[in-house]
């Protein structure tokens, strides 16, 4: 069964901490994405990657960075966590254009 | 900027009836549109993709239409069951690398 695995379901971090969210896919997909989901706002794209070491900003990249050193792993980094980054973070992958995404189960991050 | 609108109010229907959810978009002409199902606390699950040159797509009890003139997609669940209760998201391609823009979703509640 193909999978996208996010390392944590729930995280609580303090303001100012550096936070790493990890995502691993086992489907050899080219494209990987990080979204955050907030009530009433839907999913908003933070960053995406279309190949190893390649990354592009999404719609809301401020305060975030990403790393893709291996094809299967795409990491989201909150450089200095703030309370407005409290959210559900969703990682997804897709094989190529027009394919549906496979999402992970999400990480609910709370910054206090 | 691109905008996707889904009815924010929950849709409540009786078991066995057909549920119809609406997705409207502005300021864009997507090459394809996707629908996802999301259960509470979980990542979205891909259901269907419909391309701009397709009027209708079916999968089991699901049917999606795509009207590029009206800039609208309709998502139908026929012979609905309580297990169909979930939030349904529509998503449009955002131009390249299979980037998607998501609507905020509509919650469907099917009552026995």
Image (cartoon, coloured by chain):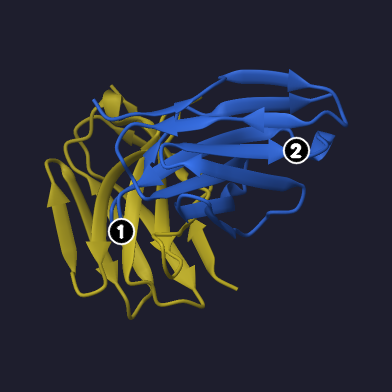
Q: Residues within 10 Å of mark 2 (few under 14, many from 20)?
A: some
Mark 1 secondary-structure assignment:
strand
At horizontal 28% and vertical 21% (from top left) the residue drawn is B112
The colour assigned to chain A within the rendered structure: blue
Which residue ends up furthest to the bottom in the rendered image?
B69
The quadrant in which residue A59 appears is: bottom right
Q: Left or right: B82 with respect to A42?
A: left
Whether labels 2 and 1 share one chain = no
Q: Pinpoint the chain carrying mark 1.
A: B
- Residue placed most toward the observer, B83 or A69: A69
Number of marks in the rendered image = 2
Residue at 41% x, 56% y: name it: B91
> Which residue has dot 2 on it?
A85
Please tell me whether residue B30 is drawn above or below residue A75 in the rendered image. below
Quadrant showing the C terminus of chain A: top right
Kindly report which numbered mark, 2 or 1, lies closer to the viewer in this rendering. Answer: 2
**Residue B62, how many percent across, how many down?**
19, 45
Return the residue at label 1.
B74
């Amino acid at each position: 069964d193909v999978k996208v695995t996010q390392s944590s379901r729930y995280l609580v971090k303090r303001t100012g901490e550096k936070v790493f969210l990890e995502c691993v896919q086992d489907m050899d997909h080219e494209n990987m994405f990080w979204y955050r989901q907030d009530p009433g706002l839907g999913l908003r794209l933070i960053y995406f990657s279309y190949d190893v070491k390649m990354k592009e900003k999404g719609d809301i990249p401020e305060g975030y960075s990403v790393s893709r050193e291996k094809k299967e792993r795409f990491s989201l980094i909150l450089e200095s966590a703030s309370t407005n980054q409290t959210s559900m973070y969703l990682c997804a992958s897709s094989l190529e254009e027009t394919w549906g995404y496979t999402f992970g189960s999400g990480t609910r991050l709370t910054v206090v | 900027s691109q905008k996707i609108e889904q009815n924010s109010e929950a849709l409540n229907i009786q078991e066995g009836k057909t549920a119809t959810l609406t997705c409207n978009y502005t300021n864009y002409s997507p090459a394809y549109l996707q629908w996802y199902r999301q259960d509470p606390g979980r990542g979205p699950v891909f259901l269907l993709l419909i391309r701009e040159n397709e009027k209708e797509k079916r999968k089991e009890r699901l049917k999606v239409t795509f009207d590029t003139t009206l800039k609208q997609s309709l998502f139908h669940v026929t012979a609905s069951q309580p297990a169909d209760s979930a939030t349904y998201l529509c998503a449009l391609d955002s131009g390249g690398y299979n980037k998607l823009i998501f609507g905020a979703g509509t919650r469907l509640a099917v009552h026995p």
